[in-house]
Image: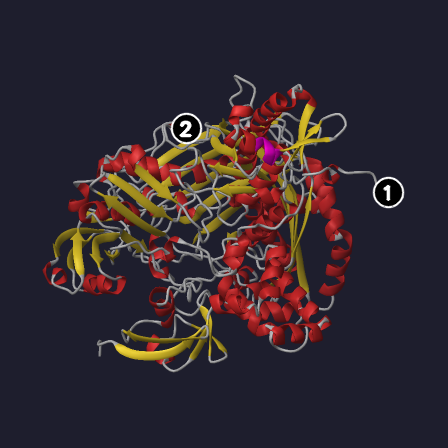
Amino acid sequence: MNAPLSPLDRPNSYIGRSVPRPNAKRLLAGRGRYVTDIVLPRMLHAAFVRSPYAHARIVSIDLDAARKMPGVRLIATGEDLARLCTPWVGTLDHFKGMKSPPQLPLPVDKVVWSGQAVVAIVADTRALAEDAAEAIMIEFDELPAVVDIDAAREPGSPVISPELGDNICFRTTLDTGGVDEIFASAAHVVEGEFHFGRHTAVTMEPRAIIADYDASESRLTVHHATQTPYQFQDLYARHYGIPEASVRVIAPDIGGSFGMKLHVYHEDMAVVGLSMMLGRPVKYVADRMESFVSDIHARDHRVRARMAADADGTILAMDVEDVTGIGAFSAYPRTSVVEGNQVFRLMGAPYGFQTYRADLQVVFQNKVQMSQYRAVGHPIACTVTERLVDMVAAKASCDVFDVRARNLIPDDAYPCASPTGYRFEALSHHACLARLRTMMDYDRLRAEQAELRTRGIHRGIGIAAFVEITNPGPAFYGVGGARISAQDGAFLKIMPSGDVHCAISVTELGQGTETIISQIVAEHLGVDRARVKVTTGDTENTPSGGATWACRGAGIGGETALQTAKKLKENVLSVAGAILQEQPNRLDIRNGWIIDAATAQQRIELAEIARIAYFRSDTLPPGTQAQLSIAHHYAPQGYPFAFTNGMQASHIELDVETGFVRILKHWVVEDCGRVINPMLVDEQIRGGVVQGLGAAFFEECLYGDGGQLINGSLADYLVPMAVEMPDIAIAHVETLTMDTQLGAKGVGEAGTAAASAAALNAVNDAMAPFGGVLAQVPMTPVRILKALGRI
Amino acid sequence: MTAPVNIQMTVNGEAVSCAVAPRETLADFLRQGLELTGTHTGCEMGVCGACLVVLDGQVVHSCLTFAVQADGSVIETIEGLNDRSVIADIQEAFHARNALQCGFCTSGVLMTAHSLLSQPGVPSREQIRDALSGNYCRCTGYEAIVDAIESVARDRAAAPAARQIEEAGA
């Protein structure tokens, strides 16, 4: 007996299908072309002298010896570059009262973090540039370093930027009212102080850039390992006074990004100026040690939070204070406030309570900049909320699944809004919760846990609900004055052979953008996917758009591709109708053939339409102008964000003698709406979970009292490796967004959003018989042993 | 001490004769001197595994080896393994399973996989994860890599004869 036909059985049905990435073959053959691989004629290499101090005045710089070193072509200081590059300020208008000092490529009078680039050297090779860097003498007058987030806010603290008055970048509050009354009368109040260390992206390919300024044409070409080429085209044009049309940014294969490669870095801006000064290509690749002290760091929060619940465990209110340290200034152009803003607005987001109060303080300190990294703010909000929910469950003698079932927003309650102002179109918490329970065989795990405890084996089970922000509209950055686009565009053409080329503004970082765009175009145009070539990452031959960040590639880029394909199909059918003397609306395209829409009978091949249009337009009916190339843009409207949701669970085994944790298994149930390519979605989730587990157990940028990073190498900073990571089981619920025809939401950050929350709950669950409590990540063995009272 | 030193080696089956600075790493020499950019440098201190190459039959960190130390040796990089088609089944499994994302770690991971899969038998998932303990991947979360290697191991174990014939033919 035949199974009923599914949508995937239709010809050219690619949406929903796990197809491998065509462009991955190049990478597997060793033929990737990263910025680090690119060599341009007459290219020179930059190196930087960095500050050894976290805070110091620059007294003098002696370049004489270095200038005489072999192969040195240019040495530039902050003053040299300030003559070319206008300063930038990392603020956005919609964060009222936010402040940040102006920044330049290199400092002119003082340094504000240890590792800050001070002098640039350009030489024939990187090694020669580094040799010369050794010969540069800089005299510093060390200033007291502002390191601790509390000390930074005390009256009398040294102020990093005296012109700003204090070390507060931004402060804001939210208050629905009624919080004190609820906490005064609630049956249960739970609270905690949570610490989230700094960690960093540690992309496999470090930051890399080649700037090539051609003075004869006043033209700048930048090969840049970035996820946002259009943003950098705009920035280089404006800050260096070059017409935008004369600036080309090319992002070829990118060796990992995760949000880290969309911020302005001082060295990168400097390299553009260095190329302008020399009229030659200049390359800079951060080495790993430089990456640790100059890439953005992430997180860095101290959250004090409490939750009120009634006797049966119904959550009534949350009260939150978040203090976050961002370095000496706010990152540009997206600011370092978005992280904290998302922390305090995502608190409690999966739950139905409506009484909420929060205080957010964003604090300057003498450390490298902290800013957006995968799952901006999400892990903090999720971990605090989910730990408090578990504490409520314990107080109310509820199971962790039951307390969530009681409090999660009902699946039929949408649309609705959070007390923090987020509007939810449709989420599926309860469906995900039920699915998770079945998938992980929760009841069996609990029984096994109890049995193993009698034998001295201590396992922990932790679950976490999450909400993720995806598909952001202009409300995210545009309204604040940032020239960061929330729309995307595509050029789509039928080539003379009938092959299809799509050039689109969302970018490929290995997550599979080009593959899913080809799936969508092929399905909606009606051609074999192998005939659709997608190109990305070059401002010169793609439309301007937002590119890839905040989980917008599938939802916004995908919808752009869908609409563009439909529009081109209309054009094709119009020409076909003219050739066939048929009404276009009676025709369709399937498998590269124009068919009769009613009977599916093949009428004429798409390649033949293309041949006629390109080479024998004389045979077309008079007045017919075939439009086989189109440009189309799509900007999200409707909901300001497409929120997604899901549940995660962590199963761990704790060695209470050593504090070591073995991660046994991790589960994720995720709802990103339409799943375009299940395999790629699952691999995004797995990678995201492992980044979250890295933060949960290993990764932390450790600073000494003087503001020195003390573990800034891959030998000292721990990243998750294969042997420590578990297998990760994944399931999906699909709640489509009705804001688009495609119905897809984002998924790139979901794994990271809740992995550390589930892990923290699991470790606390394992420690529960010992009365140990931990509210800090990473959960190192030492911290666990302290929580257990063993040391 | 800093004068260039003449070295000779066989790289991907081709004789190479070059003068290199004594301080130049094998990784930099392969990437810059020979334009074999499939070998990557991710940490330059022997931790991340992106620079792994085969040197005289052993998988080594080319970032921890000076080019002059490789004088007289036989080296194979990802380009060589690819062109000889000896890892075609591994590459195909990685492709089908999406066992890579950005691809920057992939050459090194393939070196480890090639080395592991050259041993007899089918390694357990734990053994595969252990073998990968010197390969840092930020994108995948490793599971797809483990899956891909496991599937190749099973396929090779199931059809060793066919593989030997294939290799002899190649």
Q: As drawn, which residue projects farthest toward the right?
A: A1
How many neighbours does mark 2 have within 10 angstroms: few (below 14), some (14-19), or many (20 or more)? some
| Closer-to-camera residue (A530/A282) | A530
Q: Report if residue A609 lies within the magenta region.
A: yes
Numbered label tally? 2
- Numbered range of the magenta stretch: A606-610
Q: Mark 1 highlights which residue?
A: A2
Badge 2: chain ID = A
Q: Mark 2 highlights which residue?
A: A478
x, y percentage for residue A458?
Answer: 67, 63
Q: Nearer the viewer, mark 2 or mark 1?
A: 1
x, y percentage for residue A373?
Answer: 45, 46
Give amino acid for label 2.
Gly
The secondary structure type at the circle numbered 1 is loop
Badge 1: chain ID = A
Quarter of the figure with residue B69: bottom left
x, y percentage for residue A729?
Answer: 67, 53
Give amino acid for label 1.
Asn
| Closer-to-camera residue (A532/B1) | A532
Residue lying at 40% horizontally and 33% vertically, measured from the top left: A484
